[in-house]
Each structure stands twice: as C-alpha cells, then as structure tokens.
Image: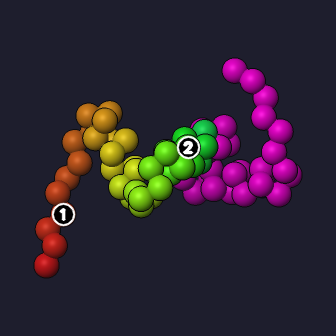
Amino acid sequence: MGLVKIDDDLHEQVRRASTVMCRSINAQAEFWMKVGMLAEANPTMAFNDIVKAQLEAADVDLPSVAVA
C-alpha cells in the first residue's frame, strides 16, 4: 500500500462520486483507476463492456434484459 498525491479538485470529485456510488473515497478512486487501466489496455471496449467483463470474471450472475 502506498500514498498517491492527487489534485484537491479531483479529490473533491472522488469524494462526491463515492457518496453517490456508496463506496469509500479510496474504493471510488481504486475503481476509477482500475477501469482507466482496463480502458487503456482495451481501447475498443466501452465502459459498460469493461464492467460487464469484470463482473463475469468474478462469476457474478447477471440477469438478461429483454430487448424489444
């Protein structure tokens, strides 16, 4: 574990997002960093595809949505 220096304005945005997403500030920052790394490694994947792939890799049962 280490310390990461981030801009005060970015920290405030992380704090606000963490409240909405019901995560700690650290968990929100970790989530954004992980998604950012995955997006850079997979530039053709959309955010939703990245999250879906991660949920599937964690064996989360995702419900199917009927498309009309």
Q: Residue shown at 40%/50% (left/top)?
A: 50
Nearer mark to the viewer, of 1 and 2 = 2
In-image side of 9 versus 27 (left or right)? right
Categorize mark 2 by other alpha carbons within 10 Å: few (<14), some (14-19), many (20+).
Answer: few
- The answer to which quarter of the image holds residue 59 is top left
**Which residue is situated farthest in the top direction here?**
1
Q: Residue shown at 41%/59% (left/top)?
A: 44
Categorize mark 1 by other alpha carbons within 10 Å: few (<14), some (14-19), many (20+).
Answer: few
Q: Quadrant of the C terminus?
A: bottom left
- Vertical side of 67 occupied by 49: above or below: above
Check if residue 17 falls in the magenta segment.
yes
Q: Residue shown at 17%/57% (left/top)?
A: 64
Mark 1: amino acid: Val
In terms of depth relative to the viewer, which is nearer, 39 or 23?
39
Whichever of callouts 1 and 2 sits on the residue coming sooner in the sequence is 2
On the image, the x and y values in percent for residue 15 come to 71, 51
**Which residue is situated farthest in the bottom direction here?**
68
In terms of depth relative to the viewer, which is nearer, 61 or 53?
53
In-image side of 61 versus 50 (left or right)? left
- Count of marks overlaid on the render: 2
Asked if one can make out residue 24 in the rendered structure from this viewpoint, the answer is no
Check if residue 14 falls in the magenta segment.
yes
Q: Magenta segment range?
A: 1-29
In-image side of 12 versus 53 (left or right)? right
On the image, the x and y values in percent for residue 45 come to 40, 57
Cα distance between the residues tagged 1 and 2: 28 Å
| Disc 2 target residue | 37
On the image, the x and y values in percent for residue 54 come to 37, 41
* Secondary element type, mark 1: loop
| Disc 1 target residue | 65
On the image, the x and y values in percent for residue 26 come to 66, 37
- The answer to which quarter of the image holds residue 17 is bottom right
